[in-house]
Image (cartoon, grey):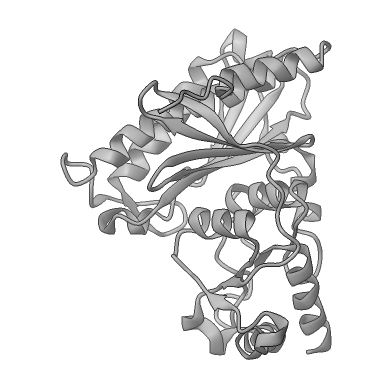
Amino acid sequence: MPINRNVQTLDEFTIQQLRDFPHATGELSNLLRNIGLAAKRVNVEVNKAGLVDILGDAGMVNVQGEKVKKLDVFANDQFIKVLQHGISCAGIASEELEEFVAFDDEKSIHSKYVCLFDPLDGSGNIDVNVSIGTIFGVYRRVTPVGTVVTRQDFLQAGSQQVAAGYVVYGSSTMLVYATRRGVNGFTLDPSIGEWTLSHPDIRCPERGKIYSVNHGSYFEFERGVQDYITACQSRPNEEGGPLRQRYVGSMVADVHRNLIKGGIFMYPGTTSRPEGKLRLLYECNPFAFIVTVAGGRATNGQIRTLDIVPKSLHERCPFFVGSAGMMDDLKKKLSNA
């Protein structure tokens, strides 16, 4: 089999980016490489799940009131350790922790960036071998460099992100990240242990044939969301319908598929939880940034997700994200309800 010698690794790709922007310090590139390193470590344990004692509950409940899986704990620890021991991150906030963690060593306080992440999204699927993932967003700190970061550095609107990304631990392991210049995907090559550029310049199709939503809550959704779901199901063949419903229960897997193939992901508020379930800072903002850079859209049903100014670290919000044309259709249904 011929060898593709034109494949770029993540390191080579980020170095090339630095060459294209000679005034860049390389700090953000280094931070992204550190995230890639932590993801490799998590991937090793995910691949051993079922063979070692890494499955099941850890016997704890997180700040969200959810049972914590053993892999949740491992993934959270790995990302914190790698970022803390690097030189490009001033602090982190994690979905698994009630408060942010400020790194107060001399190197860290002179870093420009903070990182917010969900270390293992879809962890309820771990025991049944369904794709899971990591989600992250990177912000430039607003407090002076040289000081310890504060809550103010983390409570920024999603539009202030300088980078965001996710990792899919599935049939192959893939890291997708976005900066304002574009979205690129890297697949982990197990033969050399490197992230290799497999999906350059990802663009979200204008439309797709898939909608993703938890149908079990249909009767708790607002009328506009119900109308949109009905329209997806009843679209005639000559207009490309009916659309297919695909919902894994792992946000990373669902949004990744829709980003690549076109589609819409919906996690609306319900009558019992009008604020929704997804976390604004750890799940919604990173995906809103990625999909928007790729040409799609993301809202809470009223305004752009990226324009919401968070009031707390674990704020929740309804979330709709996907192909621009499908998001337009949804907007019309919500407006007419």
**In this rendering, would 335 be left or right of 317?**
right
Q: Position of residue 168 (x, y in %)?
A: 47, 45
At x 49%, y 40%, the residue is 174
Q: Choose between 331 and 69: the one closer to the eye.
A: 331
Quarter location, residue 27: top right
Q: Position of residue 76 (x, y in %)?
A: 42, 37
At x 78%, y 89%, the residue is 337
Q: Choose between 260 and 85: the one closer to the eye.
A: 260
**In this rendering, would 8 be left or right of 227?**
left
Quarter location, residue 315: bottom right
**In this rendering, would 299 be left or right of 37?**
right
Residue 203, compared with residue 65, is above or below; it is: above
**In this rendering, would 101 be left or right of 207?**
left
Residue lying furthest top: 106
The reply to whether residue 99 is in sight is no
Residue 138, compared with residue 59, is above or below; it is: above
The reply to whether residue 81 is in sight is yes
Quadrant location, the N terminus: top left
Q: Choose between 3 and 209: the one closer to the eye.
A: 3
Quarter location, residue 222: bottom right
Q: Position of residue 263 (x, y in %)?
A: 64, 66
